[in-house]
Image (cartoon, helix red, strand yellow):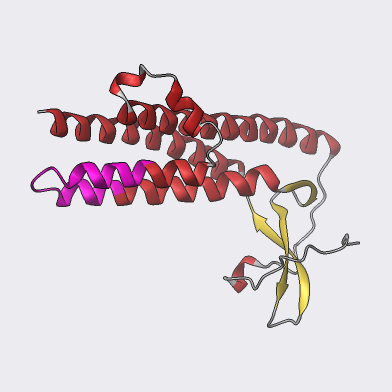
Amino acid sequence: MINPLPEYCEEIENIEDIIYDVDLIDVSEKEEEVFFKELAEKIGTIIICFNALERDIDECLLELMNDRCEDPKIWILIKDFSFDKKTTCLKQIYAEMLNHIDNTTDLTSKINILFNKITELKVFRNLIAHCNWVNHSNLNYFETKVKFVSSKNKVCRIRKELTLHDLDNSIEKMNTTRDELYELNTEIIMKIFN
């Protein structure tokens, strides 16, 4: 039974993401217990890694807005920023800094690629954080949202296949993105102050 539907139901962008029929397989209680124990650890790691990425973005903002983060009043400005606001501000600061450097095509490209990755990671993190892990089918397909599908002219539960391997890849991508952010921030600061 679907609870009363949210008013923000929107058209699904990719109709292939909708899985109406999922093959149900018999899974023993022990298999399910082992799977969910490993799943819980990976979900926790994703949330922690994403939080660390957000903290790194905070640090970059602080470093760029005042000399080596020495003025604690800057925290007052950014403490209530959403993740999107922080990433938008950081990207704009980088763009402004590049206006004072010659030959920035390579850096501009790096900035765009990095912030596209950060946006993808945010979308994935939100999917993980808000997925209905209890309502699953065969330990592979999990309910992620409820949307109106115009081609079916009805509201459908959207299920997405998520494997433990997918979660491992996302954890690795978050850690790599953190390293890339640090390298990019260092490279831009070095170019500005040299």
Above or below 73: residue 138: below
Q: Nearer the viewer, residue 36 or 190?
A: 190
Q: Quadrant of the C terminus?
A: top left
Residue 92 is a magenta residue: yes
Residue 83 is a magenta residue: no
- Picture residue at 38% right of the left edge, 19% below the top: 71
Position in image of residue 111 (x %, y %): 29, 46
Residue extending furthest right? 1
In the image, 132: left or right of 63? right
User: Magenta-highlighted stretch: main secondary structure?
Assistant: helix
Kindly indicate the quadrant of the structure image that contains residue 91: top left
- Picture residue at 67% right of the left edge, 70% below the top: 10
Position in image of residue 33 (x %, y %): 79, 33
Q: Nearer the viewer, residue 183 or 60?
A: 60
Kindly indicate the quadrant of the structure image that contains residue 17: bottom right
Position in image of residue 13 (x %, y %): 57, 71
Magenta stretch, residue numbers? 90-111
Q: Nearer the viewer, residue 130 or 134?
A: 130
Q: Quadrant of the N terminus?
A: bottom right
- Picture residue at 69% right of the left edge, 81% below the top: 150
In the image, 134: left or right of 128? right
- Picture residue at 54% right of the left edge, 42% below the top: 82
In the image, 79: left or right of 10? left
In the image, 122: left or right of 104? right
Position in image of residue 16 (x %, y %): 60, 70
